[in-house]
Amino acid sequence: MTTFTINCQSIQLTDEQFYQLSQDNQDLRFERNAQGDLIIMPPTGGNTGNCNAGLTAQLWIWNEKNKLGKVFDSSTGFTLPNGANRSPDVAWIPLERWNNLTTEQQNKFLPLCPDFVIELLSPSDSLSAIRQKMEEYRENGTRLGWLINCQSRQVEIYRQNQEVEILDSPMSLSGEDILPGFELNLEPIW
């Protein structure tokens, strides 16, 4: 399946209109870039969905033990500081940031950029487009991001003010000082 981008610059959807459009069409997955273009993404296939669930589960279990923040799945929308609306496959924010949001903000697209994100490259994704998205996360405040490419068995690690690090066939990844004590097991992914 193909991702479609619709130029919406002449109508400039407000955040509320974009949120309502997403709610009215829950069978579709929408994102919006910083220029206001609407991105319609196909649903994932079985392998990708299963991998996403496993990644989210590992982070959720770690967070449930440590109670340091909130974990979000791929259906959660974030409004980034640059105005883009993105839905990373897995995301995490510290508890303090979550508690600083109003109840209304918690119930809609979160008005912030996650501190940690994972994007899992699916067969329908363009590697260059996902790399651009990872850069966008980093430019908007993500402190640690992992782009996982199962086909090439590579992981690209995005950190603030550092070059992207590429790992070949790692068996695990460290949450470093962002997610202290978290180790993502990649064996089930490969």
Image (cartoon, grey):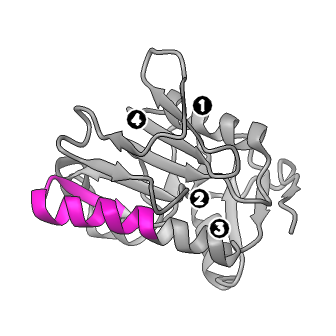
**Secondary structure of the residue carrying numbered label 2:** helix
Residue 102 located within the stretch drawn in magenta: no
Q: Are marks 4 and 1 in contact (CB under 8 Å)?
A: no
Residue plotted at (19% across, 57% down):
99
**Secondary structure of the residue carrying numbered label 4:** strand
Residue marked by disc 2: 15
Q: Are marks 2 and 3 in contact (CB under 8 Å)?
A: yes
Q: Label the magenta part by its dominant secondary structure.
A: helix
Left or right of 135? Residue 73 is left
**Secondary structure of the residue carrying numbered label 3:** helix
Relative to 108, say whether 180 is above or below: above
- Of circles 1 and 3, the one toward us is 1
Q: Are marks 2 and 1 in contact (CB under 8 Å)?
A: no
Residue marked by disc 4: 144
Residue marked by disc 1: 135
Residue plotted at (54% across, 74% down):
50
